[in-house]
Image: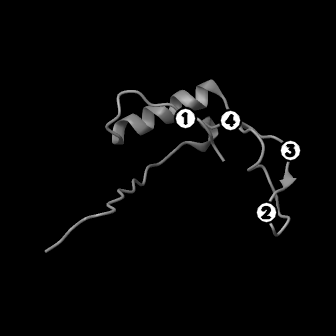
């Protein structure tokens, strides 16, 4: 008997990185290793980039309403 309990599909899609514009906050030493990172700051995705990514996601995901809340 086969049971797919934690089935997680993974999609491999080409994304034009030149269309992704992110305004990153300052680098802060946030981990125990004191590695500089923007994980604790707000990273803003341009509205053009957000629309571009949502169009790609809609091709593969069955949701009618979708938004990007955070990007890191």
34 sits left or right of 15 in the view: right
Residue occupying the far left of the picture: 1
Q: CA distance from mark 2 to mark 4?
A: 25 Å
Viewer-closest of 27 and 48: 27
12 sits left or right of 71 in the view: left
- In the picture, residue 64 is in which quadrant? top left
Residue occupying the far bottom of the picture: 1
Q: CA distance from mark 3 to mark 2?
A: 15 Å
18 sits left or right of 1 in the view: right
Question: Are circles 2 and 4 on residues that touch, CB within 8 Å?
Answer: no
Say whether disc 2 or disc 4 marks the residue closer to the N-terminus. Answer: 4
Residue drawn at (68%, 35%) of the image? 21
Q: Which residue is mark 1?
A: 68
Assign a secondary structure to mark 2: loop
Residue drawn at (17%, 71%) of the image? 2
Q: Position of residue 46 (x, y in %)?
A: 66, 28
Say whether disc 3 or disc 1 marks the residue closer to the N-terminus. Answer: 3
Say whether disc 4 or disc 1 marks the residue closer to the N-terminus. Answer: 4
> Which color mode does the image show?
one colour
Q: Which residue is mark 2?
A: 31
Q: Which residue is mark 4?
A: 21
- In the picture, residue 6 is in which quadrant? bottom left
Q: CA distance from mark 1 to mark 2?
A: 25 Å
Q: Which residue is mark 3?
A: 26
- Nearest to the eye among marks 4 and 1: give it: 1
Q: CA distance from mark 3 to mark 1?
A: 21 Å
Q: Position of residue 20 (x, y in %)?
A: 63, 38
Say whether disc 3 or disc 4 marks the residue closer to the N-terminus. Answer: 4
Q: Residues within 10 Å of mark 3 (few under 14, many from 20)?
A: some
Assign a secondary structure to mark 4: loop
Assign a secondary structure to mark 3: loop
Q: Position of residue 45 (x, y in %)?
A: 66, 33
């Amino acid at each position: 008997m086969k049971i797919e309990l934690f089935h997680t599909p993974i999609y491999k899609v080409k994304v034009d990185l030149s269309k992704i514009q992110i305004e990153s906050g300052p680098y802060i030493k946030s981990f125990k290793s004191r590695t500089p990172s923007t994980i604790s700051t707000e990273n803003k995705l341009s509205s053009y980039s957000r629309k571009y990514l949502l169009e790609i996601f809609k091709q593969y995901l069955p949701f009618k309403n979708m938004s990007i809340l955070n990007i890191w």
